[in-house]
């Protein structure tokens, strides 16, 4: 169990930004918050990708984007070969040391964000050859209080700040394709595919997701969080949560029932991780005779007998997607 649970702290910050506004901070806090989002604090990063029109139309200037996975970007410029480019103003991205990179990534100033990210769309433009460009401000959750209050200097001068930052980026001739590194972004930054179409992730959904990560840290450690975000479709997990609470929104005891649903769902996820961890253990796998050559149904029965879990329940735990 971890002594430090950053996801629990982050969840509390997200909830706080729903409970108070900028005017409720004292003068010192207001000043410090404004200083944090001063244009001088930011560097510019670039991420090019291909995006269908239907997805792109979800974006609007001024929208907040909550992205439940890390984002890779580069601190250099290339010709834009894909139809959509994200320019990201960030003080949260961390450049990856060159000695940790494969040769093809060493000359692109590759950087990565944290595991969960907040952006505000400052501008959307099209180039002469009809490619799209979005300017995003990358901020931490508490800074949303200032962004909600009124237009900040970085928002008022977004285009001039971008032009200035572009002059500082080195230019490279090679095409840079980050889609392989950004494989966790299954739709687009901040956008989830649902049964009814493409929608922005909501703050409530991110608060739920942070509770999931917090419980994983409490039961396991931060390494299991990284394993979880690699193995699971986070958009799907959030959709299951959203559909579950949608069914009870008219209930008289909505808040109480919502908490019950969240606890039950998180327990299912934790059980799934436990089963996966057991099945990944070499000693555990070694007890199966000729396991690799058995049919899926035979494997399922053998695992079910070993763990003393009903086969139908085991199916849900092993494959929650």
Image: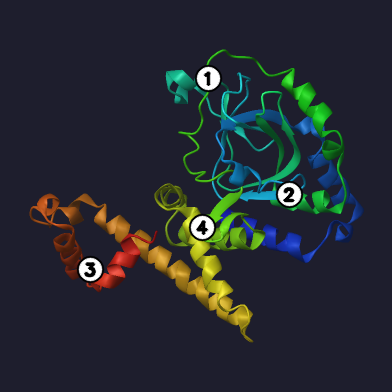
* Residue appearing at x 59%, y 81% in the figure: 256
Mark 1, residues whose alpha carbon is within 10 Å: few (<14), some, or many (≥20)? Answer: few
Viewer-nearest of labels 2 and 4?
2
The numbered mark at residue 175 is 1
- Could you tell me residue 268's position as x and y percent? 40, 68
Write down the residue under mark 3.
Answer: 307
Q: Give the quarter of the image for residue 14.
A: bottom right
Q: Which of the two discs, 2 and 4, labels the residue nearer the N terminus? A: 2
Write down the residue under mark 2.
Answer: 63
Viewer-nearest of labels 4 and 1?
1
Q: Which of the two discs, 4 and 1, labels the residue nearer the N terminus? A: 1
Q: Secondary structure at mark 3?
A: helix
Mark 1 and mark 2 in contact? Answer it, CB < 8 Å.
no
Q: Which of the two discs, 3 and 4, labels the residue nearer the N terminus? A: 4
- Could you tell me residue 211's position as x and y percent? 55, 62
Q: Secondary structure at mark 1?
A: loop
Mark 3 and mark 1 in contact? Answer it, CB < 8 Å.
no
């Amino acid at each position: 169990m971890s002594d430090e649970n950053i996801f629990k702290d982050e969840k509390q910050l997200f909830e706080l930004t729903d409970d108070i506004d900028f005017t409720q901070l004292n003068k010192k806090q207001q000043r410090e918050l404004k200083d944090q989002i001063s244009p001088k604090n930011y560097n510019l990063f670039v991420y090019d990708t291909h995006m269908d029109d239907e997805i792109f139309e979800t974006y609007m200037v001024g929208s907040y984007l909550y992205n439940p996975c890390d984002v890779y970007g580069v601190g250099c410029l290339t010709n834009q070969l894909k139809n959509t480019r994200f320019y990201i103003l960030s003080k949260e991205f961390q450049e990856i040391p060159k000695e940790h990179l494969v040769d093809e990534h060493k000359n692109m100033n590759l950087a990565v964000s944290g595991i969960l990210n907040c952006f505000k769309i400052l501008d959307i433009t099209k180039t002469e050859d009809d490619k799209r460009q979005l300017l995003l401000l990358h901020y931490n959750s508490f800074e949303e209080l200032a962004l909600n209050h009124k237009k900040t200097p970085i928002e008022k001068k977004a285009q001039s700040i971008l032009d200035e930052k572009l002059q500082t980026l080195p230019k490279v001739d090679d095409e840079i394709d980050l889609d392989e590194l950004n494989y966790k972004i299954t739709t687009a930054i901040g956008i989830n595919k649902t049964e009814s179409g493409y929608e922005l992730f909501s703050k409530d959904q991110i608060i739920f997701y942070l509770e999931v990560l917090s419980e994983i840290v409490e039961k396991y450690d931060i390494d299991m969080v990284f394993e979880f975000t690699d193995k699971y479709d986070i958009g799907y997990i959030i959709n299951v949560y959203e559909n579950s609470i949608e069914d009870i929104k008219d209930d008289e005891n909505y808040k109480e029932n919502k908490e019950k649903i969240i606890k039950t769902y998180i327990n299912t996820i934790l059980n799934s991780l436990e089963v996966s961890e057991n099945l990944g253990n070499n000693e555990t796998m070694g007890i199966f005779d000729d396991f690799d050559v058995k049919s899926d149904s035979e494997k399922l029965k053998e695992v079910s007998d070993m763990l003393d879990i009903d086969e139908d329940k085991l199916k849900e735990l092993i494959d929650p997607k």
